[in-house]
Amino acid sequence: MSRFLSLTAVVLIFALTAATVYGKNEQCREHRECLDAGTGCKGGRCRCWTDSGNAIADFWACDDDSLCEKRFPGTATACRPTEDCRPTSGLMGYCQPR
């Protein structure tokens, strides 16, 4: 029984550390670590695309997955709504790695 509990604890710790994501203004190393679709990793922090300027925000903005697939061919991206940042260009959300 104790071996089972030890194995369960190891698996749980691995799962929690392997899937670490960060919210707006939290530290990050790459875009996929930022939880909200409206954010990307810039300067070591998850920042709103709109904070980087309209051209950057417009590039990431989307209404459906097909636009993300055109912009990022061969990568697994999806169009997702933002909760922490404002949408841009009248579109519903931003392309985000799956």
Image (spheres, helix red, strand yellow):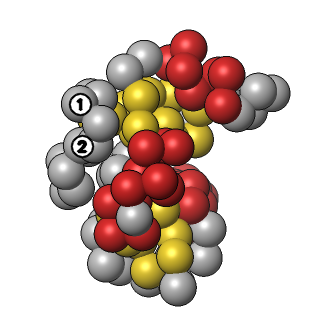
- Name the residue nearer the viewer: 44 or 12: 44
Residue 8 locus on image (x, y percent): 51, 55
* Residue 36 shows in this picture: yes
User: Which residue is found at the position 48% from the left and 62% from the top?
Assistant: 40
The residue tagged 1 is 90
Image height of 46 relative to 88, above or below: below
How far apart are the alpha carbons under marks 1 and 2? Answer: 7 Å
Image height of 65 relative to 74, above or below: above
User: Which residue is found at the position 42% from the left and 17% from the top?
Assistant: 64
**SS state under label 1:** loop
User: Which residue is found at the position 49% from the left and 56% from the top?
Assistant: 56
Residue 17 locus on image (x, y percent): 53, 67
Q: Which mark is residue 45?
A: none
Q: Which quadrant of the rendered structure holds the C terminus?
A: top right
Residue 51 locus on image (x, y percent): 33, 69
Q: Residues within 10 Å of mark 1 (few under 14, many from 20)?
A: few
User: Which residue is found at the position 43% from the left and 44% from the top?
Assistant: 58
The residue tagged 2 is 87
Amino acid type of disc 2? Pro
Q: Quadrant of residue 97?
A: top right
